[in-house]
Amino acid sequence: MNINDLKLFEAVALHGNFTKAAEAMFTVQSNVTARIKSLEEEFGAALFLRTSRKVELTSAGKTLLHYSKQIGNLIEEAKLSVGKSDIIKGHIKIGFLETTMALKGPGIVNEMANKFPLVDIDLISAMRDTLINDIMNYKLDAAFIPAPIYNEELEQIHIMDERIVAVTPIGIKSLNNLIEQHQIKAIVFDQGCFFRARLEAWLISNNIMNYHKTVINSIEGVVNFIESGIGFSFLPEEIVSSFYSGKKIKTFPLPKEIGMVKTVLIYRKDNVSSPVLKAFLSLFS
């Protein structure tokens, strides 16, 4: 076993596919397959469950991934401590809700580029549960998500408090006017969206169990449909005021229990030895 074997193993775990892992590592599939087989023989355990559609980590594979990440972090840390250069370089993957990325992504990229110019950043947007799952499976290094989060394996840093507002067509006079309509129409993101969950909780609190929904997975699309009079939605107040103040829409404040959300930055506690992750976290210390 060598370090490259572990990198190939991590690539297969990340992509869930031998061919994609080979492409990402600039090698051939036969080499990846051979090295994984060699690792399995060395550890005496199957590392992946192989099906016709994908490969998944076994429990032994998940354990090895945990140690492989730590080994990689220690090697990078050793290079900084022992080597002639203390310049941090590498690659980091950060997850966001789409709304948080729109608000905070550009500033974070600029600050990282100024302070750590040799660190490349991948920004990935996804639903909250997907982001948490990807952190747990080492597919992301850190992610910005709405609190609360209860997981002993994760560390969290409070980033900001946001206010959610109801965004409606221009003709709506009040929230009471909205819920008194014959048919409630909403523009929402897919299931799993934090703002959709808050919207549905608010409707339920007003004894509305059913509503007509139009699913659109872009902020721009949601706002455009609201402006067209098709329905309403819940969005962060800062998104609306920063990017859509010229639209023919209205916003209404919501009760505190529905309208306030705390955003936290989460990361695995066992990944904190990564010099690149440490550099990123230093932006929020």
Image (spheres, helix red, strand yellow):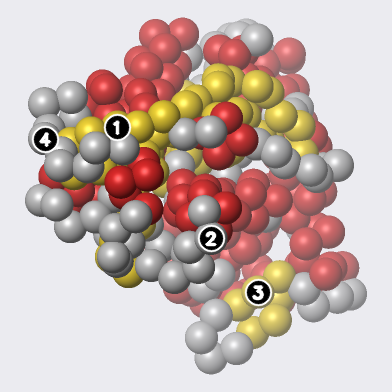
Which label number is shown at residue 56? 3
Q: Is residue 82 visible?
A: yes
At horizontal 86% and vertical 75% (from top left) the residue drawn is 45
In front of the other: 203 or 17 = 203
Q: CA distance from mark 2 to mark 1?
A: 22 Å
Front-most of 251 and 131?
251
Q: Few, some or many C-alpha atoms within 10 Å of disc 4 (few <14, some 14-19, many ≥20)?
A: some
Chain-order first, disc 3 or disc 2: 3
| Relative vertical location of residue 191 with respect to residue 166 in this rendering, above or below | below
Q: Which residue is mark 2?
A: 207
The label shown at residue 270 is: none
The mark nearer the N terminus, 4 or 3, is: 3
Q: Nearer the viewer, mark 4 or mark 3?
A: 4
Q: Earlier in the sequence, mark 1 or mark 3?
A: 3
Badge 3 density bin: few <14, some 14–19, many ≥20, Cα 10 Å: some
* Residue 76 visible somewhere in the drawing: no
Residue bearing the label numbered 1: 251
* Dot label at residue 248: 4
Question: Which quadrant would the C terminus be assigned to in this image?
Answer: top right
C-alpha separation, residue under disc 3 versus residue under disc 2: 43 Å
Residue drawn at point x = 74 percent, y = 55 percent? 65
